[in-house]
Image: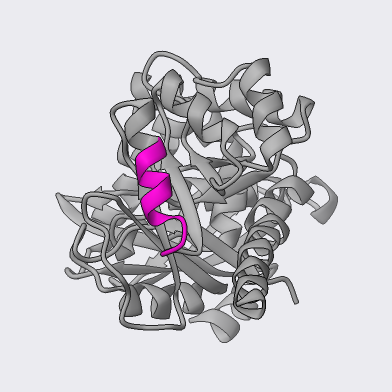
């Protein structure tokens, strides 16, 4: 049986729903586990140990992002970076301590090019495709973001980058089942095997890498 | 008019879905929202291709019919429904069946 993971879910205090409630619903939908990655301004440790703890770093400058990575890397399992700004995307792709660069595209630019793709490949940074705009927006804005994500996906495919699909949920209504996410990812240009691995194999690989790292650190001590 | 022979009929699937919402939604609003979401995502031509028809909806669980080749499109349309009459909701496909009786028995 395939194990599905959603690595970018937001919970209380950033939004109204508790992590436990989101985990319960996601299990019903078919996810094995979820990672709570609140934005860095709302971050706090989780009470439950069953849920994966993560963070989505929001930084205004490259230096600020480096400082935040130094602070949070040892505190969380999944370290994601809130993309959009080209300088932020560059720092995120150049740092091997970053796990996922979420939505590198912004309203006007796709935020990813061949140089950043090579950095991301070298540092093993996954590119996160957040699909929440598909139900939050309609019309031109949605079409624009979809075209930017298509461009990013073609770059990721060309350089064989790791891709992570996520619902980017801000409430339990935003949680989508794996089959729904796979159906929506067809519009980005993904085929069935790519979208399945973006929800199962690749998140599992990232988790294994981080959990193994924690274990080996403890053994070393 | 005579009924078309099976080889000329469209192959259909029956899709059961459930809605998570704080408010009970009536069938007419749900149908209008599905049609609106379809035309927004796929356009009028896309809507024609789906062969969509809402068979039943009781406020929480519903059943719809679509063409077999377009089940994934219907699934993605249902995933893009954000709200009905300003109330947030989430729609999830529970299962797909080849017959109406099968869909009712297994999923409703």
- Name which quarter of the figure residue A12 lies in: bottom left
Measuring from the top left, give residue B11's x and y in whole percent. 73, 53
Asked whether, in this view, residue B69 is left or right of residue B31, the answer is right
Asked whether, in this view, residue A56 is left or right of residue B87, the answer is right
- Name which quarter of the figure residue A199 lies in: bottom right
Magenta stretch, overall SS:
helix
Camera-side residue of B87 and A71:
A71
Measuring from the top left, give residue A195's x and y in whole percent. 68, 48
Q: Outermost residue, top direction? A: A108
**Residue at 50 percent of width and 58 percent of height:** A78
Q: Is residue A30 above or below residue A7?
A: below
Q: The C terminus of chain A lies in which quarter of the figure? A: bottom right
**Residue at 36 percent of width and 52 percent of height:** A71
Q: Is residue A6 above or below residue A145?
A: below
Camera-side residue of A5 and A161:
A161
Measuring from the top left, give residue A34's x and y in whole percent. 48, 68
Q: Is residue B72 above or below residue B49?
A: below
- Specify whether residue B74 is in view: no
Measuring from the top left, give residue A36's x and y in whole percent. 39, 64
Q: Is residue A73 above or below residue B20?
A: above
Asked whether, in this view, residue B94 is left or right of residue A171, the answer is right
Camera-side residue of B87 and B14:
B87
**Residue at 46 percent of width and 83 percent of height:** A50
Camera-side residue of A180 and B75:
A180
Point out the stretch of residues depicted in magenta: A66-75
Q: Is residue A219 magenta?
A: no
Q: Is residue A68 magenta?
A: yes
């Amino acid at each position: 049986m395939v194990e599905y993971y959603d690595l970018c879910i937001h919970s209380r205090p950033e939004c109204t729903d508790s992590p436990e409630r989101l985990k319960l619903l996601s299990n019903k939908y078919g996810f094995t586990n979820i990672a709570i990655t609140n934005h860095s301004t709302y971050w706090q440790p989780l009470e439950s140990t069953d849920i994966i703890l993560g963070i989505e770093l929001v930084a205004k400058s490259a230096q600020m992002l480096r400082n935040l990575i130094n602070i949070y890397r040892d505190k969380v399992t999944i370290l994601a970076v809130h993309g959009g700004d080209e300088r932020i995307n560059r720092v995120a792709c150049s740092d091997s301590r970053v796990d996922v660069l979420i939505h590198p595209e912004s309203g006007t630019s796709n935020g990813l090019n061949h140089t950043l793709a090579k950095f991301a490949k070298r540092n093993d940074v996954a590119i996160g495709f957040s699909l929440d705009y598909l139900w939050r927006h309609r019309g031109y804005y949605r079409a624009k973001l979809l075209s930017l994500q298509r461009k990013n996906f073609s770059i990721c495919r060309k350089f064989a980058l790791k891709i992570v699909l996520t619902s980017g949920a801000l409430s339990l209504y935003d949680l989508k089942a794996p089959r729904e996410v796979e159906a929506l990812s067809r519009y980005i240009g993904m085929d069935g095997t790519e979208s399945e691995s973006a929800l199962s194999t690749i998140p599992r690989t990232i988790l294994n890498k981080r959990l193994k790292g924690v274990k080996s650190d403890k053994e070393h001590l | 008019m005579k009924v078309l022979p099976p080889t000329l009929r469209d192959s259909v699937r029956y899709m059961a879905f459930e809605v998570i919402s704080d408010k009970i939604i009536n069938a007419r609003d749900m149908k209008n929202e599905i049609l609106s979401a379809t035309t927004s995502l796929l356009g009028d031509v896309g809507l024609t291709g789906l062969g969509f028809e809402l068979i039943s909806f009781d406020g929480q669980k519903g059943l719809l019919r679509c063409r077999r080749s377009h089940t994934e499109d219907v699934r993605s349309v249902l995933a893009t429904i954000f709200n009905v009459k300003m109330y947030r909701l989430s729609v999830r496909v529970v299962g797909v069946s080849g017959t109406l009786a099968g869909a009712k028995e297994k999923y409703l």
